[in-house]
Amino acid sequence: MSRFLNRFVISFSQLKEGAYNYDYEITDEFFDKFEYSEIKKGTLSIGVKLEKLSGILSLEFTIKGSVMTACDICLDEFEIELASKNTLYVKFGDDFREESDEIIFMPMNSQEINIAQYIYEYIHLSLPMKRVHPELGGKSSCNPDMLKRIDELRNKNYVNGSWDVLKNLKNKKEEN
């Protein structure tokens, strides 16, 4: 684990039962630590409320900020505002395992948890399914050159024999 990600370790073994708050600022450097991250740039504030109870930890993550991501249409990067809340429950057992997206088990003798991976996942999960430039005045703010190229390709009539064969199959089926 990189030294940078060690700042996301929360030592809970010496904490008394109760609630504790932790705040983190996420920048580009955070995303650099994850090899296959869809996000390369961003500035986010992460609030973590840890509640220690007998035999269980509850971690509530509050994420606010913005990230740069590629547009699904023109592939240019643009900024998306993110805001989400996620809860992770940590129970204790014989070994580490993930029970569900919200519940993990850690060994009984665990004394700390590194929440970097969970922050990373929650940020990515808060991205919208469809990522496109916002419309400005009813018009797309996508890269106009790319929109033009897409439109040209859409309007171009390609001759491709395999598609014609499929079209013929479809027509025969409709006739029967």
Image (cartoon, grey):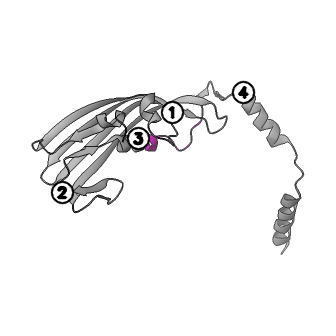
For label 4, count other residues whose C-alpha is less than 10 Å away and answer few (under 14), some (14-19) or many (20+).
few
Front position in the image: 28 or 156? 28
Q: Give the SS element for disc 2.
A: loop
Residue 88 place in picture, x, y as percent: 29, 48
Looking at the image, residue 97 lies above or below residue 154: below
Task: Give the prevailing secondary structure in the magenta stretch.
Answer: loop
Q: Give the SS element for disc 3.
A: helix
Would you say 102 lies left or right of 168 here? left
Real-space CA distance between mark 1 and mark 2, rounded to the nearest whole angstrom: 36 Å
Q: Amino acid at mark 2?
A: Met
Q: Which residues are magenta?
A: 124-134
Task: Please report the residue visible at 26 percent of the width from the left and 61 percent of the height from the top.
Answer: 95
Tag 1 residue: 40
Task: From the image, state whether disc 4 or disc 3 is nearer to you.
Answer: 3
Q: Give the SS element for disc 1.
A: loop
Tag 4 residue: 144
Q: Amino acid at mark 3?
A: Tyr
Looking at the image, residue 46 lies above or below residue 60: above
The N terminus: image quadrant: top left
Q: Amino acid at mark 1?
A: Lys
Point out the tag, 1 or 2, that comes first from the N-terminus: 1
Tag 3 residue: 120
Q: Give the SS element for disc 4.
A: helix
Residue 163 lies in magenta, yes or no? no
Real-space CA distance between mark 2 and mark 3, rounded to the nearest whole angstrom: 25 Å
Q: Which mark is residue 108?
A: 2
